[in-house]
Image (cartoon, helix red, strand yellow):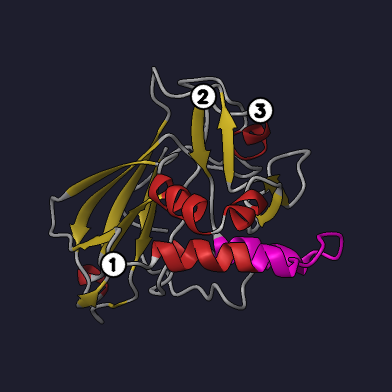
Amino acid sequence: MLGHVRDLGRDAVNDPTARIYQTAERQTYHTDSCDIVGLLCLKTSRSGGASALVSSMTIYNEMAKRRPDLLAELFRSMCTDRRGEVPVGENPWHDIPVYSWHEGYLSALYARRYIESARRFPVVPPLTDRQKEALDLFDSLAEDPDINMQMGFQPGDMQWVHNHTMLHDRTAFEDWPEPERKRHLLRLWLAVPGARPLPPVYTQRFGTTTIGDRGGIIVPGTMLNAPLEAV
């Protein structure tokens, strides 16, 4: 699945269907709906917009050492807002743990901002104090410069991230005023042969857990193309 990463002037705070990658805001650490996420830089911003990476496996290890009681909270289902990308027959949120063990593999699925925005639905219960504490520790570890890294992009640079064991982020940026100069990346989501097995609960997010044929977002009105001009 190929798509654009570009500031379209949307407001992710007040618009419940806006995606963070359509803004100039910081994204915060999260995962995508795929096995491998790739980025190709076409144009850079005037300032900011660095890419950041951290291992969700390292975060797991640190939480296991420091607060195994809070780590246990992240193995329980946690509603996450679909932000308007709702497949037919599904709820406008999915209910998947941050961490899942399956067939000997530990995988992570995470988007703190969308976990919080899922509380806009009356039937979704508020986060408990324990859940908030666990998420706060997870985030503080992700922000630790001893275990994360940042990198700048130049036109032509490519990045590949294993989604199930890594979190990625982007710092806020200031863009150029001229439309033809604005920051623009192409994002590729891949379902790869030989990938790890995923737990059945991931079907809520990935559509299926079939290796080589999973992930992406297919909803009513989806157009299966990616014109070079961002729309």
> What amino acid type should be assigned to the residue bearing mark 1?
Pro
Sequence-earlier tag: 2 or 1: 2
In the rendered image, the quadrant that contains the N terminus is top left
Spatial CA span between label 3 and label 1? 34 Å
SS class, disc 2: loop
Report whether residue 22 is seen. no
* Residue placed under numbered mark 3 in the picture: 200
Q: Residue at x 69, y 52 (%)?
A: 78
Kindly indicate the quadrant of the structure image that contains residue 75.
top right
Q: Residue at x 22, y 69 (%)?
A: 180
Vertical side of 49 occupied by 40: above or below: above
Disc 3 crowd, CA 10 A, few/some/many (<14, 14-19, 20+) = few
Sequence-earlier tag: 3 or 1: 1
User: Left or right of 208: which side holds 24?
Assistant: left
* Residue placed under numbered mark 2 in the picture: 104
User: Left or right of 148: which side holds 165?
Assistant: right
> What amino acid type should be assigned to the residue bearing mark 2?
Gly
Vertical side of 175 occupied by 20: above or below: above
Q: Residue at x 42, y 23 (%)?
A: 195
Sequence-earlier tag: 3 or 2: 2
User: Left or right of 106: which side holds 204?
Assistant: right
Question: Residue 202 placed where, x, y %?
Answer: 62, 35
Which residue is at the front of the view, 177 or 29?
29
Q: Is residue 202 magenta?
A: no
Which residue is at the front of the view, 81 or 54?
54
* Residue placed under numbered mark 1 in the picture: 145
> What amino acid type should be assigned to the residue bearing mark 3?
Pro
Spatial CA span between label 3 and label 2? 14 Å
Counting the numbered discs, the total is 3
Q: Which residues are magenta?
A: 112-132
Q: Is residue 119 magenta?
A: yes
Which is the main secondary structure of the residues drawn in magenta? helix
